[in-house]
Each structure stands twice: as C-alpha cells, then as structure tokens.
Image (cartoon, helix red, strand yellow):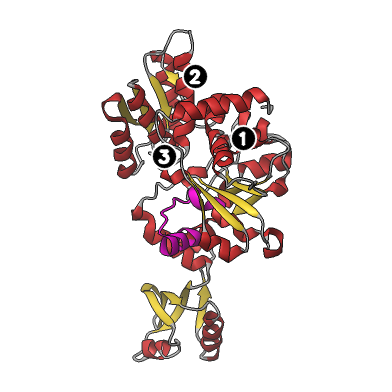
Amino acid sequence: MAVTTDFCADVRHAASAMRRLFPETPLQENAYLSRKTGARIFLKREDLSPVRSYKIRGAFNFFRKILDSPEEQPDVFVCASAGNHAQGFAYVCRHLEKRGVIFMPVTTPQQKIDKTRLFGGEFVEIRLIGDYFDACYRAAQDFAASSGGMMVPPFDHEDIIEGQATVAFEIEEQLPQGVTPDLIILPVGGGGLAAGVTCYFGADGPRFMFAEPVGASSLHSSLTERHRVRLPQVDNFVDGASVAEIGEANFAALAHFSPGDVTRIPENRVCATIIEMLNIEGVVLEPAGALAIDALKDLSAAEIAEKTIVLVVSGGNFDFERLPDVKERALRFEGLKKYFVFRFPQRPGALRDFLDLLGPEDDIARFEYLKKSARNFGSVLIGIETKDAANFALLRDKFDAAGWTYQDITDNETIAGLVI
C-alpha cells in the first residue's frame, strides 16, 4: 500500500465519520514509565474504546465503505473471531442496525461470548462451530458464500487498514504542540494496525518498532525470508496477536522494514508487564495490549534518553480468570518462582530436614508426591517462591551440600507441561 495524500485524506475522513460512533481515545503521558526509562512516554489508550480495543475502527470503516457504495448491499455481514474483532464487529452491527452473524469456536470462553452478544444485541447471531479457529473460519466462509453475506476480515483488507490508521491521525492531533514522536512502538498480530499507522506517517515520519510474541512472530519471519511465511504452529497465549500468517495487504505495506525493526516478546515476560501496570498504574491490559509497553525493555537507556516515544496500547479485554496463570508466568520469568522434582527419602524427619534449608524469604508454593520411585524414595514436585531471584543460588548450594537429588524443571516445557 503506497503512502499518498489521498490515503491520508481518506484516513482523516474515516476518523471524522467515527466520531458518530465513539470519541477519540486518549493519548496520555505516563509519568511512571517516563521516570523508569528516562524518555517521555505517551500511551495511546485503545483499551479505552467502547469495546476496549482498536478493532472497532477497522470494522466500522469496512462497513462504512460498503454501505456508502452504490452497489447492491448485502443482507447480512459475517465474521469469524473469538476475540476483539468479534466485539468490534458486533458493536458496529448494532450501531448501524445491520444483521451480523459471528462464528466463534466452541472453546471460546463464555465471558467473550457474553460480551460480544451484549455489544451486538438483537442485531447479531453467534454460532459456535469447531474446536479451533480454522474450522470456525471455514464455516463462516461457507455461510457467507451460501447466503450472499459479506465477510468482514479482521485485518487483511485495505479498508480495515485505513480504519486502523485513524490511530495515527489521532496521535498526530493529540500530541502537545511542537512535539513529534521519535519512536512509535506498535503491537503486531495480523498487521492491520502496523500497516495503517506506518502508511499514514510515511517515510518522513518517526522511527517504528514492532512488537510481536515469540510464539507467533509471523512479521519477523516474513521480513527475514522476504516473503510471507505461514508459521507451522503458534503459541496462543497472547491471543490478540497470535496469528500464523501476516495479512497479504498488510505485509505489502510493511515489507520495506527489516527484521531488526521487530522485537519478539517472550510470553512470560509480557505477563510481568501486565502485573506491573495493574499493580502500579491500575491499568488492565490483555497480553497483546501490553506488548508495546513490554518492548521498552529491549531498548537501552542511552538509546531512548530524552526521546519522545508513543506506545499503542491495543487492548484491555482481560479475562480475570487468567490472572493466576499470568501471575505464575510473571514470577517464573522474573526468577522468583521455580519448580523442582526431588528424590525424597521415605523416613521420619525428611520433610523437616528439607524445610530447615529454606531461608526467611523462601516459601513452599506447592508440594505434591508424584510417585514412589523405590521402596525408600518418592518423587516430589516442589514449587518454591522467593522475594529475590538470587536466593535460588543459595538454595541450590544448600541442597547440594545436604546431598539432595533433584532436577529443576521450571524451564523444561515438556515435563512442566505434564506435572505443573
């Protein structure tokens, strides 16, 4: 997608039209992150849109373009999504009083189904099809083809890209007079937001940095290979950005960037950022919404000192049932929680001997017999939390000196996935 005067004018027109639906989301200077990094940090709060994500922008713009067309209008609009796209789609259907059918996997959490139904009201129908998204998406395509419905894609369409680009227009308008960003950090899933924002600012704009999860780094892989790459598998933890293949139109707009412009965020590390922003700033973020903030960790203090940086906070649809898992991942990333399998002697006093090795800042978070390995020994899973990661080095020294046989399985995904 080429950057043209017409594109920027179209984006401004799209932003004006959106004001009938919702006000601009705020651009907030964040004192905490600014002090922490030595830069001037602004957060573009897309988590404060009516559906708590930027996806409403692309969906509305797609509908608007179709409805403004002189061609025959579809009787029904269709989408497949288990997340933010479905909610934005539903909200627009209700606002425009257009019938919509939303296909979701059967495994979609009830909370997301209920929110989507709430946004769409009587104008949307939700159909639960398949255990995984691919089956759900095929069902949506089949329905659209058989019913004459119009598929509304989540990211791979020029009208969607144009809608997401309104984020850039608002950033430009909301920055204090005379202030221009040195760097804009954008989360990437399918690439609609990144394509739109970079196209709006153009080659003479700020530097861009893209943040995507390690387990779904389709943009980085595609830029490395210089063509779109479909990942053989993805880690769905950062569900708002877990896309196996970046969109075709989106990659065309981003292909001139280099792999070095992409930072790949470890899934457990973004959990630490979610907890940090919740505890310190009171900001509720979904994993994808925290990617841009987390990316600051990959920039040196010297690199960003006194720079103006805009972070796009893409979404805040966090299911609090996930909070225990997020806390667990954050502790493991920060080195404050580890899991061990010990060969435990079956004798009186063995547990007391073990507990005596723990320091005042160490706590047993889990203790579970797995099996008896021999008549006189049993395998025990022990989870330990501490207040300082350095304490684990001291513990290992104590374990070794006392003759304990054990294995640290914290980072062994195969074993940890089976027993933790």
Relative to residue 311, is residue 147 drawn left or right? left
Q: Residue at x 59, y 32 (%)?
A: 247
Question: How far apart in space, not on screen, are marks 2 and 1 (Cα)?
Answer: 19 Å
Foreground pick, 158 / 166: 166
Q: Earlier in the sequence, mark 1 or mark 3?
A: 3
Relative to residue 383, is residue 123 drawn left or right? left
Amino acid type at image mark 2: Lys
**Which structural element holds mark 1?**
helix
Q: What is the quadrant of residue 116 in the picture?
A: top left
- Report the magenta residues as a range: 272-292
Foreground pick, 271 / 158: 158
Q: Which residue is mark 1?
A: 195
Q: Residue furthest front?
A: 177
Q: Earlier in the sequence, mark 2 or mark 1?
A: 2
The quadrant in which the N terminus is found is: top right
Relative to residue 364, is residue 263 drawn left or right? right
Q: Which residue is mark 3?
A: 83
Amino acid type at image mark 3: Gly
In x, y percent, where is residue 37?
60, 63
Q: Which residue is mark 2?
A: 65
- Dots 3 and 2: beta carbons under 8 Å? no
Q: Is residue 285 magenta?
A: yes
Amino acid type at image mark 1: Ala
Q: Residue at x 53, y 65 (%)?
A: 333
Q: Is residue 102 magenta?
A: no
Q: Residue at x 36, y 73 (%)?
A: 368
Res. 414 visible in picture = no
Q: What is the quadrant of residue 189 in the picture?
A: top right
Res. 192 visible in picture = yes
**Which structural element holds mark 3?**
loop
- Dots 1 and 3: beta carbons under 8 Å? no
